[in-house]
Amino acid sequence: MKDAKTLNLANSITALRIILAPISVLFLFWDIPHKDLIAAIFFILAGMTDGLDGWAARVRKQTTQFGKSFDPFADKVLITSALFSLAKLDRVMWWMFWVIIAREVVVTVLRQLAARRGQAIGASRIGKAKTASQMVAVAAIILWPKVSWPQYCLWAALLLSVVSGLDYLFRWRVVFQRPAERSSISG
């Protein structure tokens, strides 16, 4: 693993996701023709960078600690800003927004605690599925606000958010324990 260059191709792609997030939601609030389509295009482009940055890091052997932290942060910026905007536009129920955000906060705190103890919590398969389902749901709600099936996608994303959050908490519960408690459990 190389950590020498923080601003490599993969991290630049991740930064692009953070830049595209506010551009996407900005179009939702402008009174212009085809605003939803334009917002969705920017959102989908930003979402595509999620897989692209990881691929670039692996192929170029440029995986960095910065990138491991920056990538989930970029996902949170993209999803949070989009869901907040959609809730503000009454396309997403506020309680759903808050449940999804609560999961993100809990997992972020968990990652920070683990990092303080020298451990890295990578994305699980269910966590990746959660992110993908959120991106599909948000894009669908932006494109088809008056159709019901995008709301079913959001329900699936909400369920995966809760399940993945519980999965992280269960698998990494040792992070919340004091060092003396951990050694008595493992011994």
Image (tube, rainbow, N blue to C red):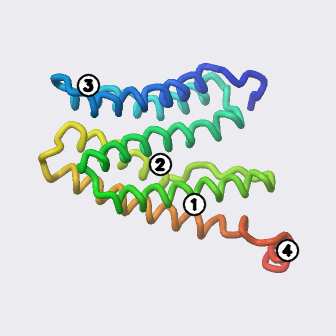
**Dot 4: few (<14), some (14–19), or many (≥20) neighbours within 10 Å?**
few
Discs 3/4, front? 3
**Dot 2: few (<14), some (14–19), or many (≥20) neighbours within 10 Å?**
some
Badge 3 vs badge 4, beta-carbon distance below 8 Å:
no
Pinpoint residue 112: horizontal percent, then vertical percent.
Answer: 70, 53
**Distance of label 3 from label 4 (alpha carbons):** 54 Å
Q: Any mark on residue 38, and which? A: 3
Image check: 167 left or right of 177?
left
Q: Which of disc 2 and disc 4 is earlier in sequence?
A: 2
Pinpoint residue 101: horizontal percent, then vertical percent.
Answer: 47, 55
Is residue 40 visible to us here?
A: no
Q: Which of disc 1 and disc 2 is earlier in sequence?
A: 1
- Which residue is labeled 1 in the image? 106
Q: Any mark on residue 183, and which? A: 4
**Dot 1: few (<14), some (14–19), or many (≥20) neighbours within 10 Å?**
some
Pinpoint residue 175: horizontal percent, then vertical percent.
Answer: 72, 65
**Distance of label 4 from label 2 (alpha carbons):** 31 Å
Q: Amino acid at mark 4?
A: Ser
Q: Any mark on residue 180, and which? A: none
Image quarter where the N terminus lies is top right
Q: Amino acid at mark 3?
A: Ile
Query: Picture quarter containing residue 136?
Result: top left
- Which residue is labeled 2 in the image? 128
**Distance of label 3 from label 2 (alpha carbons):** 26 Å
Q: Which of disc 3 and disc 1 is earlier in sequence?
A: 3
Image quarter where the C terminus lies is bottom right
Q: Which of disc 4 and disc 1 is earlier in sequence?
A: 1
Identified at 40% across, 34% down, the residue is 47
User: In terms of secondary structure, where does tag 4 sit?
Assistant: helix
